[in-house]
Amino acid sequence: MVNQSIYELMIILDTTSSMSTSLLAVKDAFKQFYKFSQLYNDDNQMLRLINISYGDYDHRYKSINDVVKVFDSNNNNFFNDILNYKLSSNGGGGDTIEALRTALYKANQIIDKPTGIIIISDACGRTSCIKCSNNKTQENLENKAINDDIFIDF
């Protein structure tokens, strides 16, 4: 039986290559926060931490599970999985719009109670920023992945 948490904190993290220097600091902060949270967690799992790491679509990464990785503190390997996660393991991205919409879609599937959400990124989500140059191929891949996932659930 999985312990039920009282509080949930979700960190949605852009893991594309343009985030390389920021991710080192984020991983260090996450390590400190995780250690701190363990001081107050008992067998009742007071705090559930969820990390959603997202990249972007391209010719290799075409499905939601290719682009978005979920790490959950209910998993015993949570901390090590995050620290060992490789930059751009889920699509490179660069300094352009990325698959934030897909990450938020995935977050919506996971959340089952009030949850604090922190988004860390250096680029806006696809179709949310008029000033960002829009890549129609990536937009089409993202739309198809989300639509395919919606129809699989029914």
Image (tube, rainbow, N blue to C red):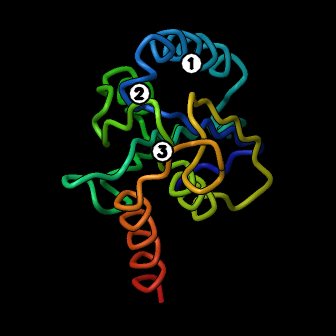
Mark 2 nearby-residue class (10 Å; few <14, some 14–19, many ≥20) = some
Q: Is residue 33 above or below residue 76?
A: above
Q: Which residue is mark 2?
A: 82
Task: Give the residue furthest to the right.
Answer: 114
Residue at 60 percent of width and 49 percent of height: 3
Q: Which residue is mark 3?
A: 98
Q: CA distance from mark 2 to mark 1?
A: 9 Å
Q: CA distance from mark 1 to mark 3?
A: 22 Å
Decide if residue 48 is on the left or right side of residue 146: right
Residue at 38 percent of width and 38 percent of height: 93
State which tag comes first along the sequence, 2 or 1.
Answer: 1
Residue at 59 percent of width and 10 percent of height: 32
Q: CB under 8 Å between callouts 2 and 1?
A: yes
Decide if residue 63 is on the left or right side of residue 23: left
Question: In the image, what residue type sits under mark 2?
Answer: Ile
State which tag comes first along the sequence, 2 or 3.
Answer: 2
Q: CB under 8 Å between callouts 2 and 3?
A: no
Q: Position of residue 51 (x, y in %)?
A: 53, 38
Q: Which residue is mark 1?
A: 30
